Image: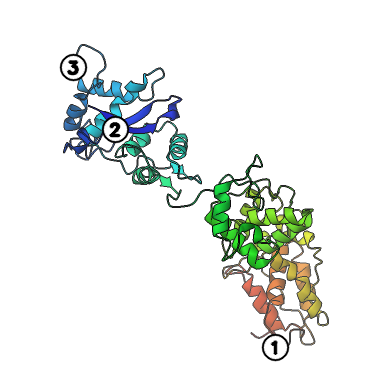
Amino acid sequence: MSYSKTLAFTAFGIGAFLQGCSEDDEKTSEVTDCATLTAYDTLFSAESTAAADAECLACVSNDDGVDDDKADTDAAADWAAAWAKIAATGSEDADRLIAGAALEACGAVRIATACSGVSVDIPSKDPVALQDEFLAQSASNVMCIVSVQIGQPDAATCASIKEGITKSGGSATFDCDADYSCVPLEDYQGEVDAANAAIAACSTCLDSKSGTGKTWTDLSPATPADFTVMVSALEHCNAQQNDARCADVTLDAADLTQANMEAKAEADLSTDAEDAECLLCANINLASSPTCAQSMVAFQDCGADVAAVKCDACADFDSAANVNCGKCLNALSHQAISPRNDNVAAFVESMLPFTTCQATIADDAAFCSTALELADVVTTTNTDLLFQKLDTDTAAELPCRNCVYYHLANLVRTVATDAYTCVEFQGAVEACSESGVAHTFPTDCVA
């Protein structure tokens, strides 16, 4: 029996290779004794779920080297010994290959769940790098490693490794058709690596994506159109985010959008070149309309301090100073104003920070859980007394008050500065209330 396919077995700290049968003999055979295995170590199969599959055991135990080195002939003991040698400390390299070779010679195929939970996600299509990462991620999962090895060609390729992992139930997100020439890129504009050395292949790739008649050095990140082209080129050439590009940026509690984060980065950094490096980094592989969470991760991966950022900070409408919403509002110098007949415009403006802090009122909002007793409030002249009573009754329920006021501030009205009506007030309270809460409203407040 000869073997030629190789998969580095460095997961066990050795230099051996797990090898399969070569093209010239067993690989071309029609042996299928082990074709329905559900576990390699026990040799359980679809037909035999409580004991080793008899046909498979008979086949593998007859393979060269499957032996426990004892005088008796015990097929199960011989197989157990061969399997144990794969990861045993002190095993000879050749001994580690025996079980896998026997399985493939007997027609074993990949097990669809062998690599469940194993993920290989590195920016490379180099077979050696992929094997190293696969073995690191699969750790001591021998079943997974053997499953991926089965069916490999004489020399493993990016495509064969990807297929082996995915058909064994793992995740392999690397792209075998991608251009990874800019993976080691450290300085995006300078086209150099961490050692400040030029990367010729990366420069060629970036130039090819810089636009008709242009090279990478012709582009200016300060020009919006050029910036877009540069980000696209970096993505195509698989430049990676670098955790030093935004290291001097500290995002604030109110920086909850990509635009705000970029503005804060420009404020924190000293030079245009630093600005460009950070913003290019933070835009690599970013969604076209990123959420707060996506933007935060992008800046974090580029080295920014994002500890203060709490996406959807005011989703709970709690404006207390020591909680996320309050911190975001404080960062915007928010000053609370209660609506009155003569200050509607100022009131609406005062509520704008809640929008910046990503407040939202869902259909099932339940911020007002205590019944408001407002039946005796006189509203025939104006609604000022109604708002005064609300402020008093919600002194300990800021989320309820803030929700009601936010709802009012965002109403689309014929005359935006008109005093709020009792009907509008009632609608806001009901929009912010838990189902079943029995509020009472003034008798002249007719919805």
- The disc placed on residue 73 is 3
Secondary structure of the residue carrying tag 1 is: loop
Choose the circle earlier in sequence order: 2 or 1: 2
Q: Amino acid at mark 2?
A: Gly
Query: Residue 327 placed where, x, y %?
Result: 75, 56
State how far apart marks 1 and 3 are (Cα). 94 Å
Packing grade of label 2 (10 A; few <14, some 14-19, many >=20) is many
Q: Which residue is mark 1?
A: 414
Q: Amino acid at mark 1?
A: Thr
Is residue 351 rendered to the left or right of residue 132?
A: right
Q: Is residue 257 visible?
A: no
Q: Which residue is at 20% across, 33% downward? A: 26
Q: Residue 366: where, in percent of width, then height?
A: 61, 66
Q: Secondary structure at mark 3?
A: loop
Determine whether label 2 and label 1 are within 8 Å by CB: no
Quarter of the image where one finds residue 384: bottom right
Which residue is label 2 attached to?
20
Residue drawn where x is 65% and y is 78% of the image: 427
**Considering only vertical position in the picture, is 431 above or below 253?**
below
Determine whether, in the image, residue 258 is placed left or right of residue 343: left
Q: How is the image coloured?
A: rainbow
